[in-house]
């Protein structure tokens, strides 16, 4: 693409494109959140042992990790559009395979392929944003994408439950096929090629390894991405522990748990709107500093309350709501800090490594929570607080480094 046409693309980039990019980043969350209510039903229909559906979630996350690692070099070598369209197609076809599954291996193959395809929706929108927008605008844009993505945890479990009750668990995955088809049609019409051929790298194993090694040697990028991963660890840790906190420890019903889970997502959307406003009033770095301080303050309050025995539902639920909602003050800014720490020609690979780090640390947080689980809230709050504190420290240290 010539510099003239790319300039025109930048001017034409509007809300429609951003909404679509946000919807594509939600591929992973809808593929997780929508089928959660169907675990027991699928186990019964396919004759699976108890807990085997948890493996389907792990296999999906593995596909996401592998897919992100592969997507980075592809989008830096082939451009953004073709790999994105291919990823959407793979996600849609894989969703159909899951819907038609008659045994455990077929289900696992479909879930892994869903992760491979869905990874394109995580990696490529970040790269497209870095193509189209200057660094000073990136925090607002990434926050907007997260705002669109945040709708999924509110709507997906409810929609999944309705589909399960009226048309069976297979309908959940057929809806994902429809979602992929609509996204593909919209992407063909709306998403332009934003990575000029002159900036692309040759797709060879040597170039891929050199690209990744160059990015990994970038101390500022690594620090910022580590911070982003640790913040994701706080969020994933909360998600993995939330069922125990509210349904087991506080004995809430599944309906009330869903309400609290949705309320936290709504809180994140509200905080995201506040972040839009703050982006117009202060620099990205001051904005991030405020976000980290607010988030860590309430995480420390939450940990302290649990440690001294003030672990009532009102106290824990209220502080958790503010602490999780305040993550929206951080996500957009720390993503921008990571992406704009590397040269533009490697944006795809940088986005891929960022995603792999986030999911690796997020998954590790869930494992650590399981290892230290003792039937109380103390290990949970300590681990979440440690993740948040380490994220802020990593961000501060990385800010002092050059590439």
Image: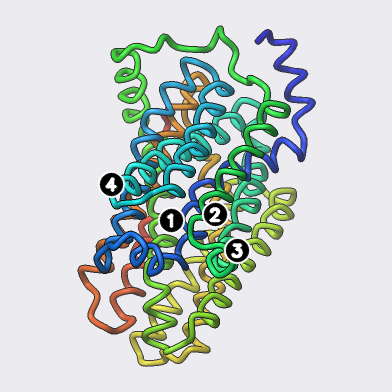
Neighbor class of circle 4 (other Cα within 10 Å; few <14, some 14-19, many 20+) is: few
Q: Are marks 1 and 4 in contact (CB under 8 Å)?
A: no
The first of marks 3 and 2 along the sequence is: 3
Cα distance between the residues tagged 4 and 3: 26 Å
Neighbor class of circle 1 (other Cα within 10 Å; few <14, some 14-19, many 20+) is: many
| Local SS, label 1 | helix
**Whole-percent x and y of residue 269?**
65, 61
Vertical comparison of 257 with 72: above or below:
below
Between disc 3 and disc 1, the foreground one is: 3
Between disc 4 and disc 3, the foreground one is: 4
Q: Are marks 1 and 2 in contact (CB under 8 Å)?
A: yes
Residue at the spot of label 3: 159
The first of marks 4 and 3 along the sequence is: 4
Vertical comparison of 151 with 14: above or below:
below
When asked about the image quadrant of residue 55, the answer is bottom left
**Whole-percent x and y of residue 291?**
56, 59
Residue at the spot of label 4: 105
Residue at the spot of label 2: 330
When asked about the image quadrant of residue 392, the answer is bottom left
Between disc 1 and disc 4, the foreground one is: 4
């Amino acid at each position: 693409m010539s510099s003239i046409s790319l300039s025109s693309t930048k001017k034409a980039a509007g809300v429609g494109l951003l909404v679509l990019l946000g919807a594509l980043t939600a591929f992973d969350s809808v593929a997780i959140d929508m089928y959660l209510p169907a675990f027991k039903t699928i186990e019964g229909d396919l004759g699976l042992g108890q807990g085997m559906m948890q493996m389907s979630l792990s296999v999906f996350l593995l596909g996401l990790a592998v897919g992100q690692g592969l997507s980075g070099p592809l989008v830096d070598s082939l451009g953004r559009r073709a790999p994105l369209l291919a990823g959407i197609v793979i996600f849609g076809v894989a969703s159909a395979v899951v819907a038609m599954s008659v045994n455990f291996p077929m289900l696992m193959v479909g879930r892994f392929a869903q992760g491979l395809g869905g990874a394109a929706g995580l990696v490529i929108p970040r790269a497209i944003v870095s193509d189209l927008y200057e660094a000073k605008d990136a925090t607002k844009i990434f926050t907007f994408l997260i705002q669109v993505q945040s709708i999924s945890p509110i709507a997906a479990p409810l929609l999944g439950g309705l589909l399960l009750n009226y048309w069976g668990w297979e309908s959940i995955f057929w809806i994902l096929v429809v979602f992929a088809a609509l996204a593909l049609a919209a992407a063909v019409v709306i998403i332009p090629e934003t990575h000029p051929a002159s900036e692309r790298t040759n797709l060879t194993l040597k170039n891929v390894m050199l690209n990744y090694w160059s990015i990994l040697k970038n101390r500022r990028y690594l620090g910022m991405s580590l911070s982003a991963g640790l913040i994701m660890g706080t969020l994933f840790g909360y998600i993995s522990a939330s069922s125990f906190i509210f349904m087991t420890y506080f004995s809430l019903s599944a309906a009330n748990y869903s309400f609290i889970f949705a309320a936290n997502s709504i809180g994140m959307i509200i905080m995201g709107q506040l972040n839009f406003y703050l982006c117009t009033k202060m620099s990205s770095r001051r904005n991030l500093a405020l976000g980290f301080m607010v988030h860590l303050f309430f995480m420390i309050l939450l940990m302290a309350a649990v440690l001294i025995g003030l672990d009532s539902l009102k106290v824990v639920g209220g502080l958790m709501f503010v602490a999780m909602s305040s993550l929206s003050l951080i996500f957009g800014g720390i993503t921008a800090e990571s992406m704009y720490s590397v040269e533009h020609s490697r944006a795809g690979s940088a986005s891929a490594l960022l995603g792999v780090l986030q999911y690796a640390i997020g998954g590790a947080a869930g494992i650590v929570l399981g290892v230290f689980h003792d039937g109380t809230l103390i290990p949970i709050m300590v681990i979440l607080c440690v993740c948040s504190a380490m994220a802020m420290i990593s961000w501060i240290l990385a800010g002092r480094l050059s590439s």
